[in-house]
Amino acid sequence: MVRQLAFTRSVIENGAVSLVPEIDGIALTEIVARFEARFDDGPVGGYGGIVPTHYRFGDLSKYYLGIEDQQSPAPGEVWLLGCHCGEVGCWPLAARIAITAASVVWSGFSQPHRAQRDYASFGPFEFDRAQYDAAVLEAVVDLQG
């Protein structure tokens, strides 16, 4: 099923701007917290958006495709969420990014601080490439705004 992507821009405690992906109008922070509620090995949720001023993500239009020169956490992978404190490395949600001319797919989710958690049934989330690119561009322009 093809999903709709958008980004919510919010100001966090220290005044920095945070970007939270929304899938079909629901914040990814909420979607993953619901999924993690089935685990009994520690915190559930606790995520916030990524904060571009706190980390060198590079060109976000390339970052969200997994093709930024210094892609974090690795080429073809992305941190979609960071910790609610604003530090991405504190509590990241990672995913693999697969791109074609027609689509972008997020899959292979992981929480590196809870390596034993199995996210195999979380996602994948598929987006129309043109809609995805437009949503990312809107977020980038909004950040510069």
Image (spheres, helix red, strand yellow):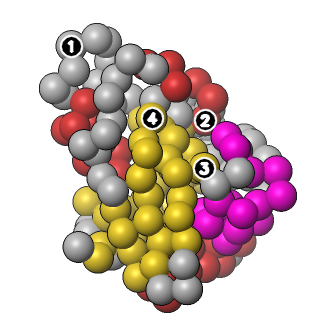
Residue 16 in sight: no
Instruction: Identify the residue position indicated by label 1 in the image.
Output: 40
Compare residues 56 and 72 and report the one nearer the observer.
Answer: 72
Instruction: Identify the residue position indicated by label 3 in the image.
Output: 77
In this rendering, position of residue 82 left or right of residue 8 = right
Instruction: Identify the residue position indicated by label 2 in the image.
Output: 88
> What is the crowding at mark 1: few (fewer than 14 residues within 10 Å), some, or many (at least 20)?
few
Which is nearer the N-term, disc 2 or disc 4?
2
Which is nearer the N-term, disc 3 or disc 2?
3
Image-quadrant location for residue 90: top right
Which quadrant would the C terminus be assigned to in this image? bottom right
Q: Give, as a three-letter code, the residue at label 2.
A: Val
Residue at 49%, 47% (x, y): give it: 95
Residue 140, compared with residue 37, is above or below; it is below
What residue range appears in magenta?
Answer: 59-74
What secondary structure is marked by label 1? loop
Instruction: Identify the residue position indicated by label 4 in the image.
Output: 110
